[in-house]
Amino acid sequence: MPLDALCLSGVIHELNTALAGARADKIYQPGRDEVILALRTQNAGNVRLLLSANPARPRLHLTTLPLENPERPPMFCMLLRKHLSGARLLALEQAPLERVALLRFEALNELGDRVERKLVLEAISHKTNLILLDGEGRILDCIRHVGADLTSAPRVLQPGMFYRLPPGVNKANPLILDRAALEELLAAAPAEAQADRWLLDTFGGLSPLVCRELAHRAGGSTDVRLNVLGPEGRGRLLDQLEKLRETVTAGQYAPVLISMEGRPRDFTFLNAGQYEAAAQVDRWPAFSPMLDTFFEQRERQDRVKQKGQDLIKSVTSARDRTARKIANQEKELAATRDRDRLRRLGDILTSNFYQMEKGMARLRVQDFYDPEGREIEIRLDPLLTPQQNAAKYYKDYNRAKKAEEMLTIQLEKGRRELDYLNSVLETISLAEGERDLAEIRQELTDTGYLRRPAKARDRGKRTVSKPMEFRSTSGLRISVGKNNSQNDLLTCKLAGKGDIWFHTQKIHGSHVILWTEGDQPDLQSLNEAAVLAAWFSQARDSSKVPVDYTPVRYVKKPGGARPGMVIYTTYETAQVTPDGELAKRLRVK
């Protein structure tokens, strides 16, 4: 869900407390629509503030996610560094009942004078923007330039123009109205209106989820109508509006995360009882870790789709082409299994040359291969002699026999190819940034699926990214490969013969190495490494996933095998359930 105005007020209230007096140490722009301010605070130490202008998920909060930065910072990032590096954060403010956050900084200009700079996040869905202002409110630059001819609103967002807030909605402010004003609005409402729809249409700053919650608390149902509520229910609805005002005014927010089927679906700032047993509602101590958890998976998938779309398209196309080829070859192989019939027909023709004449199209004779001695009709080529017709059946038999041998080899090769391409698609989903995608792109170029760069300066460039690193509860190091190149590097070059190798059984996934350091690993470390192998695989949404593990000495890479493909012997199998929370807890930042 988008960050509504009241949720945003809770986030700003929380950040003002945590970031009092913070200074901007470093500034990054890991994505086109997101900026990270590395801040030094007096109480919380070094923290990172994420400001996302992604139209689908605009927000701001503290983050601990490892976001990769591009090799060359964008121009907007360079401008932020020029004006905000070393600046002191004075306060975070919010436009009244709007999804607009304003960060006020005190910075030094080129002459060493203290000046004010403002960074504005407009978190208004498709109008989302991040804007840097000078002390007079003039726009220095913004992520999205908006011209007068591109918007129906009379508002231009271009460098040099004075900044104006987005036009507000014509709705009542529930935070400033007293009981009498609320009663007057409710009395004028249509009797047949749904309570949640009336709340949404009448008051600004309320999300559909909050409106449904207030209706549920007043009438026991999210779709209750005002005429069904009656005088008592209407009184309860007004009570809920007053409690909402008191909660926001006092800053007594209660961040909650709503999950369905184990996946985060929504969030809000007050306890949500409307879902009852249909969803899991978890209370969080603060907004920032909750928002980090909620958006983590979606942001990573979007980032991979955006930056790795060409890879996904190329690999998917190659995989589908290989699958079609395998299906056709399997049909051809099935046809060769009837080749003995061709040999028998040749034998029957050879035994009945005396009944055949050139120009015959069919021959009906006794089938001496049939235990009951029934007659059989054999098709002939009228242009061929009897001997040539028999030889043709023998030739077709030998061709089918040879085709079976070749198709069996080709099918085995094709299935290995399909297996490899599926593994590449899985590694693309594990990519955490441009370096990981570049390494996969490099691998696909080496294996012939992508063309080599046309520019000479790019042909020799080799990108190397690092595997994911974890620490078991007992302190043992665990490495997880994010792509086939890293899998080969870990298993075939870096790991010692006594280290333990993990991989999901007959399921695409990462190679996982538990570094034993020459000692016998404890059972908990073995189990945690197996859980990581299950989590970083195609079976992450399953339970009781079989994970094979064995010392690295029993893992071999056949000659000519594709990247990431190995064989292993003398292994044991553990049944584990993937656990994303364990992966987060053990991850080395």
Image: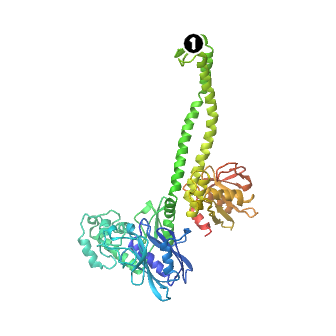
Image coords of residue 59 (percent x, y): 45, 71
Q: Is residue 402 left or right of residue 26?
A: right
Q: Is residue 274 left or right of residue 177?
A: right
Asked whether 242 or 112 is in front, the reply is 112
State the residue at coordinates (48%, 66%). 295
Relative to 493, does residue 419 appear above or below in the rendering? above
Total label count?
A: 1
Image coords of residue 370 (percent x, y): 60, 18
**In terms of image quadrants, where is residue 542?**
bottom right
Q: Which element is circle 1 on? A: loop
Q: Dot 1 corresponds to which residue?
A: 356
Asked whether 261 or 442 is in front, the reply is 442
- Under mark 1, the amino acid is Met
> What colour scheme does the image use?
rainbow
Residue at far front of view = 456
State the residue at coordinates (59%, 20%). 345
Camera sees residue 87: yes
State the residue at coordinates (58%, 66%). 584
- Point out the image quarter for the N terminus: bottom left
Image coords of residue 387 (percent x, y): 61, 17
**In terms of image quadrants, where is residue 415?**
top right
Image coords of residue 383 (percent x, y): 54, 18
- Point out the image quarter for the C terminus: bottom right
**In terms of image quadrants, where is residue 192?**
bottom left
Residue at far right of view = 518
Neighbour class for label 1 at 10 Å: few (<14), some, many (≥20)?
some
Q: Is residue 139 left or right of residue 63?
A: left
Residue at far bottom of view = 113
Camera sees residue 368: no
State the residue at coordinates (57%, 12%). 356
